[in-house]
Image (cartoon, rainbow, N blue to C red):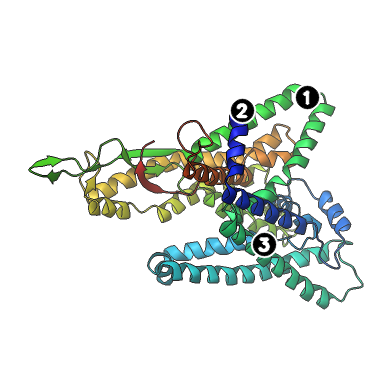
């Protein structure tokens, strides 16, 4: 306890770090406050009542979880930061496939990054207009959610501007946290939206189990959740170290080693793709939500299948979800991990992997190891994604079951690790002890392959 208090004192004694933390907290408070400001002409009570009438495992409830409840409240932040995330994913994928975006990302430096940011912002606005139209259509079809005395054209036009402004403002808040706050602004906005639903879900689960006198089951739930979080942290931080060594060089008249074997490594991430595969898969799984609205009673089997795919707790949904995650993990890892680059880097640095010839053999060696360690990482992420369904099947409250895995848990773990890593770097720069007794906290900042020293 004394060590913890001393660490907090050290954090508060660094003025720059203290200012960044306070700025971040203020911005997050502004973001959460905006989640309770309702769109003009929208009856938040009727919208909330309609959302309660839907199934707890409906996909719209999952969207509401990601937006911190703003979706079901008809808030100006109802779309949250998700349009920006979608735009960022699209631009990132274009960077792998379109030569123009490849030049911007790899060759044009700071000017290229600024241009990419501009393109991402414009694309965010377009996506917001599309998603905002769908959201307003949902409001119009919800009984009592929209004031009937308002002209439909005025309602649509004014609220489209407000929704677009809300998303752009949320994006701006995230960028300000990244520039002047603790960093990882967009990720923190997503995390605070997710975690805003945690206390309510947790209290409902505890009261429900206590009411039914299921103390043992409640304790077992907490223990299982603890170990799931620990396992997620281990996989997120897991790396496979490949020792590298510099070729012999002439020192005077004798040959010496360029580096000490065992201290320099190529670090292959066990989960190089991070949370991206589960986000891609989740985006695809939202498509049946639209298709289900067009299903008719005459299409019996098709309608039943679409209904099942609209239920995150159904067997069909989770089987498809798991397969998509494994596939996207391999695809995204292949996109971001380029063994050829690292083989060329080692060649330029006059280094090599002991027992492996430079050149194509090094490329094949790194590629083989990456493929092998990606499989357990992909399976683990897939299992994490379907854990909420298993938890709900075991009797856990559906709202609380979402925190037993899925995108929520991966984002929470990843963002917390990133934030702690930022804080620890400030402590170490000021010659203070880090947040842990040994080693250093590793976040998601370094994905794929990194080259560094073993610690």
User: Can residue 59 be seen in this snapshot?
Assistant: yes
Between residues 275 and 105, which one lies in front from this camera angle? 105
CA separation, marks 2 and 3? 38 Å
In the figure, is residue 414 to the left or right of 161? left
Percent position of residue 128, x then y: 66, 67
2 or 3: tag closer to the N-terminus: 2
Which of pointers 2 and 1 indicates the residue nearer the eye?
A: 2
Between residues 419 and 122, which one lies in front from this camera angle? 419
The image quadrant of residue 344 is bottom left
Percent position of residue 402, x then y: 68, 42
CA separation, marks 2 and 1? 36 Å
Which of pointers 1 and 3 indicates the residue nearer the eye?
A: 3
Percent position of residue 70, x then y: 76, 56
The image quadrant of residue 239 is top left
Between residues 18 and 31, which one lies in front from this camera angle? 18
- Give the labeled residue for mark 1: 214
Q: Are marks 2 and 3 in contact (CB under 8 Å)?
A: no
- Give the labeled residue for mark 3: 170
Report the disc number at residue 400.
none
Q: Residue furthest right?
A: 149
2 or 1: tag closer to the N-terminus: 2
**Quarter of the rendering occupied by the N terminus:** top right
262 w.r.t. 214: above or below: below
Label 2 crowd (10 A; few <14 / some 14-19 / many >=20):
few
- Give the labeled residue for mark 2: 2
Which of pointers 2 and 3 indicates the residue nearer the eye?
A: 2
Label 3 crowd (10 A; few <14 / some 14-19 / many >=20):
many
User: Can residue 297 be seen in this snapshot?
Assistant: no
CA separation, marks 1 and 3? 41 Å
Residue drawn at x 39%, y 35% is: 455
72 w.r.t. 242: above or below: below
């Amino acid at each position: 306890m004394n060590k913890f208090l001393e660490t907090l004192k050290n954090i508060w004694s660094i003025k720059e770090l203290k200012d960044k933390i306070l700025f971040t907290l203020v911005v997050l408070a502004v973001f959460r406050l905006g989640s309770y400001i309702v769109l003009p002409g929208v009856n938040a009570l009727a919208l909330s009542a309609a959302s309660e009438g839907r199934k707890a495992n409906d996909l719209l409830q999952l969207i509401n979880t990601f937006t911190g409840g703003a979706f079901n409240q008809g808030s100006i932040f109802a779309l949250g930061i998700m349009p920006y995330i979608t735009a960022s994913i699209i631009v990132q994928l274009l960077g792998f496939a379109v030569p123009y975006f490849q030049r911007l990302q790899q060759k044009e430096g700071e000017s290229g990054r600024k241009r990419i940011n501009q393109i991402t912002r414009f694309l965010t606005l377009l996506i917001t207009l599309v998603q905002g139209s769908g959201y307003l259509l949902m409001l119009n079809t919800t009984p009592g959610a929209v004031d009937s005395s308002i002209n439909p054209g005025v309602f649509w036009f004014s609220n489209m501007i407000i929704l677009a402004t809300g998303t752009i403002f949320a994006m701006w808040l995230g960028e300000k946290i990244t520039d002047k706050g603790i960093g990882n602004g967009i990720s923190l906005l997503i995390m605070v939206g997710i975690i805003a639903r945690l206390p309510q879900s947790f209290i409902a689960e505890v009261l429900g189990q206590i009411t039914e006198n299921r103390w043992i089951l409640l304790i077992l739930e907490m223990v299982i959740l603890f170990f799931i979080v620990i396992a997620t942290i281990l996989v997120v931080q897991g790396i496979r170290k490949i020792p590298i060594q510099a070729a012999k060089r002439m020192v005077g008249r004798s040959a010496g080693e360029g580096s000490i074997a065992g201290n320099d490594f190529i670090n292959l991430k066990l989960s190089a793709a991070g949370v991206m595969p589960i986000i891609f898969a989740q985006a695809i799984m939202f498509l049946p939500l639209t298709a289900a609205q067009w299903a008719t009673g005459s299409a019996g089997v098709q309608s039943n299948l679409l209904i099942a795919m609209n239920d995150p707790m159904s067997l069909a949904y989770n089987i498809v979800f798991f397969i998509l995650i494994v596939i996207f993990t391999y695809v995204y890892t292949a996109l971001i991990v380029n063994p050829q680059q690292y083989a060329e880097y080692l060649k330029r640095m006059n280094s090599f992997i002991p027992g492996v010839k430079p050149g194509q053999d090094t490329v094949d060696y790194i590629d083989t190891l990456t493929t092998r360690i990606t499989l357990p990482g992909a399976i683990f992420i897939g299992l994490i994604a379907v854990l909420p369904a298993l938890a709900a099947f075991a009797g856990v409250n559906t709202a609380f079951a979402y925190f037993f895995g899925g995108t929520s848990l991966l984002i929470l773990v990843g963002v917390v690790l990133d934030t702690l890593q930022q804080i620890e770097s400030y402590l170490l720069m000021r010659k203070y002890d880090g947040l842990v007794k040994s080693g250093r906290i590793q976040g998601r900042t370094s994905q794929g392959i990194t080259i560094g020293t073993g610690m």
